[in-house]
Image (spheres, rainbow, N blue to C red):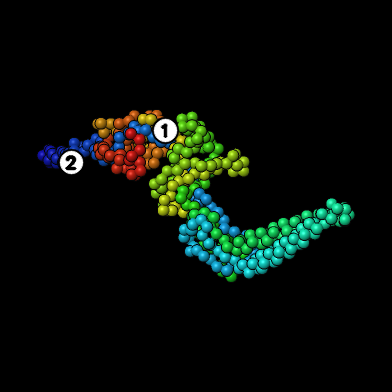
Amino acid sequence: MSSRNTMAARGCRLLLASAIPTCLLAACSPSEPPAPPPLDISVVEAVSRDADITLDLVGQTRGSTDIPIRARVQGFLESIEFLEGRPVTKGQLLYTIDPASFRSRVVEAEGYVAEARTLLANAKADLGRIRPLAEMKAVSQQDLDGAVARHEAAIGALQAASAQQEQAEIELSYTRILAPIDGSIGISEAKVGEFVGAEPNPVVLNYVSRNDPIRVRFSINERDYLRLARKFAELRESLGPETHDKDGSLQLILADGTIHPHRGQIVGYDAAINPTTGTFTLEADFDNPGGIVLAGQFARVRAIVERRDDVVMVPLRAVAELQGNFRVFVVGDDGTVELRVVELGPEIGNLRIIEQGLAAGERVAIEGLLRLRNGSMVNANLVDLASLEPDSMQNTGS
């Protein structure tokens, strides 16, 4: 009996020893994993501003006046009297064409004029002798009529010879090619010694361009044209027909992204929509002191098509899209995140207009959008919206 009691006591001790660790583990292990700490994110306050809705249109610069310099007579180019790419003044000598053959034509024409004058003098003298004789019936009427005809023919011959001389002198003057306007001249299409004035050699030798103001030609589609046309109609009503399309509201954005310091105005446009391309072509002038902007550059013209008052705006980076729906994450004062579906308006720089779904002053997340969920908690770090905007946007609106 004692051995049985001993074995039973050992079994109880082993059972207790194996059960104690299990109980300790059960008591120490939590029922759920600990909650992750709140995310640290940056937020900005939605702002209310007056906003200009703009339209950017691609165009190309050209001189406000571009005049081709043509060789109006054929001949060998004798000299180039300007520095390529430099300013020229109206009436300045640009090219000379060998004038020898044209001078000889002038001399020849002068000879014809002298001959015609001599014939006219003889015819006039004959008529002076015959007319009194005809009055005395000393010569026939036929003789008088012949003298009158010869005199009139001599007058016509002198006129024709004088016209030929004038034409020869005009052609001689064409051998000296002068600048038609003040402007800048480009690189010559012909060099000294070349035969010019007939194909395949250059007929247009160069261009003189006036770059102040600089002109930009650009095209818009039919829908955008209607938006601009309504604005032009408003201008005509408020400012009168004499200021039509001359409001100076256009901006010129250059190829490097900088904005030309001088605003422009529309100075001309097509009479109809191009049926082939479906576009409408316009031209605008921008003051260009110093000629910084050159003809032939690509640029964008920015036109204000609408002004909106007190619109709600947030940074573009605050807006997320999912299956065609746009949403923002609104962060409350207690750090709770609310997913908000919004209706978007146009972009203004790096900001986006919110048409519906958000009020000015509400805070929206601008980072970590993929990790945010409706109802999650965050530590919000408020960022000044002005620090996210380029300089050109900080002075926009109110």
According to the picture, the residue beneath numbered tag 1 turns out to be 307
Q: Residue at x 44, y 40 (%)?
A: 248
Q: Nearer the viewer, residue 333 or 72?
A: 72
Measured along the vertical axis of the image, is residue 136 above or below residue 304? Answer: below
Label 2 Cα crowd, 10 Å radius (few <14 / some 14-19 / many 20+): few
Measured along the vertical axis of the image, is residue 57 above or below residue 90? Answer: above
- Visible residue check, residue 36: no
Mark 2 and mark 1 residues within 8 Å of each other at the beta carbon: no
Residue 324 is drawn in which quadrant?
top left
Q: Nearer the viewer, residue 314 or 107?
A: 107
Q: In the image, which disc is placed on residue 331? A: none
Query: Is 138 displayed left or right of 76 in the figure?
Result: right
Q: How many angstroms separate mark 2 from mark 1 (CA)?
A: 76 Å
Measured along the vertical axis of the image, is residue 175 above or below residue 377? Answer: below
Q: Residue at x 18, y 38 (%)?
A: 28
Q: Secondary structure at mark 2?
A: helix
Q: Residue furthest front?
A: 136
Q: Secondary structure at mark 1?
A: strand
Q: Residue furthest left?
A: 2
Q: Residue at x 62, y 65 (%)?
A: 196
Indicate the quadrant containing the C terminus: top left, top right, bottom left or bottom right: top left
Q: Residue at x 53, y 62 (%)?
A: 94
Residue 258 x %, y %? 39, 49
| Amino acid at circle 1 | Arg
Upstream in the sequence, badge 2 or badge 1? 2
| Amino acid at circle 2 | Pro
According to the picture, the residue beneath numbered tag 2 turns out to be 21
* Tag in front: 2 or 1: 1
Residue 188 x %, y %? 54, 63
Label 1 Cα crowd, 10 Å radius (few <14 / some 14-19 / many 20+): few
Q: Nearer the viewer, residue 32 or 135?
A: 135
